[in-house]
Image (cartoon, rainbow, N blue to C red):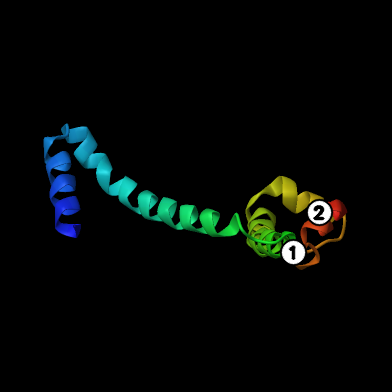
Amino acid sequence: MQNIVYDITRRVYYSSPRFIQRAAPYFVPSLRQFKKYLHELEESQWFSPKQLEELQNERLRPIIQHAYENVPHYRRIFDDRGLKPRDIDRIADLEKL
């Protein structure tokens, strides 16, 4: 089965216009990422409300850290309120902003 998919992919690639061939390497990592996210979504649809909240809180932390370090607007909001990213640990903490 894997060889069939490989052969089809290869034929599609080589029969595509050059600009598609040049763009293809940029889409392959995106497809892998898409499959990962799709798998996570399929699994999370069966999560309990508590599990969903835990997942949201887990995903929130790196977003808050990124916003603080890279977005001047959010850096000012944090600084004006005397907050650090570690102070926003849960979805409920967003009220502090």
Q: Position of residue 31 (x, y in %)?
A: 36, 50
54 above or below 81?
A: below
Front residue of this view, candidates 31 and 5: 5
Q: Residue at x 35, y 53 (%)?
A: 29
Name the disc covering residue 94, or none: 2
Front residue of this view, candidates 59 and 3: 3
Q: Position of residue 14 (x, y in %)?
A: 12, 40
Q: Farthest residue toward the bottom? A: 86
Is residue 45 rendered to the left or right of residue 31? right
Q: Residue at x 69, y 48 (%)?
A: 72
Dot 2 alpha-carbon crowd within 10 angstroms: few under 14, some 14 to 19, many 20 or more:
few
Is residue 54 rendered to the left or right of residue 34? right
Q: Position of residue 82 (x, y in %)?
A: 86, 60
Dot 1 falls on a residue whose secondary structure is: helix
| Tag 1: amino acid | Lys
Q: Quadrant of residue 81?
A: bottom right
Instruction: Tell which circle, 1 or 2, labels the residue nearer the N-terminal end.
Output: 1
- Pointer 1 with pointer 2, Cβ within 8 A: no
Front residue of this view, candidates 20 and 45: 45
Front residue of this view, candidates 23 and 40: 40
| Tag 2: amino acid | Leu
Mark 1–mark 2 Cα distance, whole angstroms, equals 18 Å
Select label 1 or label 2 by which is in front: 1
Q: Quadrant of residue 47?
A: bottom right
Name the disc covering residue 50, or none: 1
Q: Position of residue 18 (x, y in %)?
A: 16, 34
Dot 2 falls on a residue whose secondary structure is: helix
